[in-house]
């Protein structure tokens, strides 16, 4: 970090490096019967390395106006070794992402900001080296390792009262291509470009030093570009999410506790929106006691109300006894875990 004074303004220059390696063994997809493996669809060993460098300049032009410009460069290496030799291989890719923002202080407790720039998402490493469908043996196309995104947001940060902070943001996000992993086939399928728009409101309030309240609400609309009217829904894209909680933390020692709500609203499961996921609500809670020297005893309860909910829902063809040989499209789901109680003892020496 470096401080500069140029053009009558104060500038802070920040640079950095980042590196990450994911070493993944034993990623597999198998056919099973009565929960016993009978055939391997694919078994993979994946090595994914990522490195990045960034630089940004934050400038304060006056007491009310500040700006930020930055650029980031990323490089990825994908190495896949799989049971289908034709799908093993190496891929490398790089991308540069600039961004900028400007903020205007309206009052001492409110600030309006506008930001925008380029980004990316990395794709499933297995899709970057695939050449044949491991189930049928038919030729398939590799996916791009890195896919460009563009986004912008307009927001307002404000403090309606002491120790209360609210941020309201209208945002837009465009992806050059979405990606779908087909679980039964073990392949990745690139799809059309997409656009998302949404509004997010985040609130944090601390009425007293020990008590914290937070509530985040987000609504969004997502769709594929260039699809016929009514056929452009993105399966699995959330449309409304609520995360809220209350936390009590003693200043030194004593009782502490928290409760958190997670709400996922209904969302489309098919491109035409005819099938939609069921909404779900889960509440987690914990209570404990903080002793001297940092020792803590805590009881956590996951799914406090033992709600019947689904962590994920999706549509694909399956077959039950008596149904057509090709099966039929239906909603499949992974249920949320039932109520669980966990005891944690944290000892500090």
Image (spheres, helix red, strand yellow):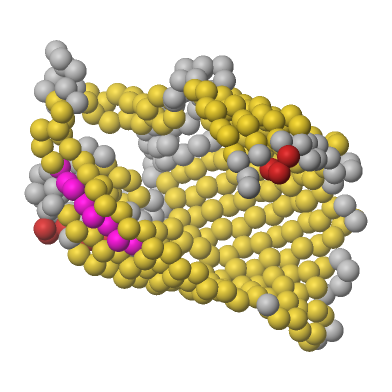
Q: Is residue 259 left or right of residue 36?
A: right
* Residue nearest the observer in this picture, 302 or 172: 302
Q: Is residue 280 left or right of residue 210?
A: left
* Residue sitting at x 57%, y 46%: 197
Residue closest to the far front? 349
Where on the picture, by quarter, is residue 205?
top right
- Residue 346, x across and y down, in percent: 59, 39
Q: Is residue 109 left or right of residue 312?
A: right
- Residue 7, x across and y down, in percent: 80, 86
- Residue 120, x across and y down, in percent: 46, 61
How many marks do you count on the picture?
0
- Residue 275, x across and y down, in percent: 39, 26
> Is residue 169 a member of the stretch shown in magenta?
no
Quarter the N terminus occupies: bottom right
From this view, report whether residue 150 is shown above or below residue 205.
below
* Residue sitting at x 38%, y 51%: 178
Where on the picture, by quarter, is residue 45?
bottom left
From this view, report whether residue 331 is shown above or below residue 174.
above
- Is residue 83 visible to us here? yes
Q: Is residue 43 left or right of residue 347?
A: left
From this view, report whether residue 183 is shown above or below residue 16.
above
* Residue sitting at x 48%, y 71%: 52
> Is residue 42 a member of the stretch shown in magenta?
yes
Chain part drawn in magenta: 41-48
């Amino acid at each position: 970090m470096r401080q500069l004074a140029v053009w009558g303004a104060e500038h802070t220059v920040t640079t950095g490096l980042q590196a990450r390696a994911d070493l993944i063994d034993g990623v597999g997809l198998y056919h099973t019967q009565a929960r016993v493996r009978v055939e391997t669809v694919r078994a993979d060993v994946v090595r994914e390395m990522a490195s990045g460098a960034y630089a940004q300049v934050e400038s304060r032009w006056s007491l009310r106006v500040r700006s930020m410009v930055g650029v980031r460069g990323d490089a990825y290496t994908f190495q896949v070794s799989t049971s289908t030799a034709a799908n093993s291989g190496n891929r490398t890719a790089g991308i540069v992402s600039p961004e900028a923002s400007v903020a205007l202080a309206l009052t001492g407790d409110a600030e309006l900001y506008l930001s925008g720039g380029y980004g990316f998402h990395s794709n499933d490493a297995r899709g970057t080296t695939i050449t044949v469908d491991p189930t049928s043996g038919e030729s398939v196309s590799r996916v791009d390792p890195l896919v460009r995104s563009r986004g912008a947001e307009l927001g307002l940060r404000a403090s309606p009262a002491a120790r209360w902070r609210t941020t309201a943001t209208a945002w837009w996000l465009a992806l050059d291509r979405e990606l779908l992993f087909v679980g039964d086939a073990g392949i990745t399928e690139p799809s059309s470009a997409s656009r998302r728009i949404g509004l997010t409101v985040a609130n944090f309030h601390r009425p007293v030093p020990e008590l914290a309240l937070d509530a985040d609400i987000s609504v969004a609309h997502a769709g594929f570009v260039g699809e016929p009217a009514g056929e452009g829904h993105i399966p699995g894209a959330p449309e409304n999410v609520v995360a809220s909680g209350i936390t009590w933390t003693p200043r030194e020692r004593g009782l502490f506790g928290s409760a958190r709500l997670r709400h996922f609203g209904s969302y489309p499961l098919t491109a035409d929106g005819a099938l939609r996921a069921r909404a779900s609500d889960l509440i987690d809670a914990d209570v404990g006691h903080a002793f001297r020297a940092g020792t803590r005893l805590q009881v956590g309860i996951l799914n406090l109300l033992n709600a019947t909910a689904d962590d994920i829902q999706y549509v694909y063809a399956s077959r039950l006894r008596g149904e057509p040989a090709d099966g039929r499209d239906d909603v499949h789901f992974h249920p949320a875990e039932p109520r669980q109680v966990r005891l944690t003892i944290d000892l500090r020496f």
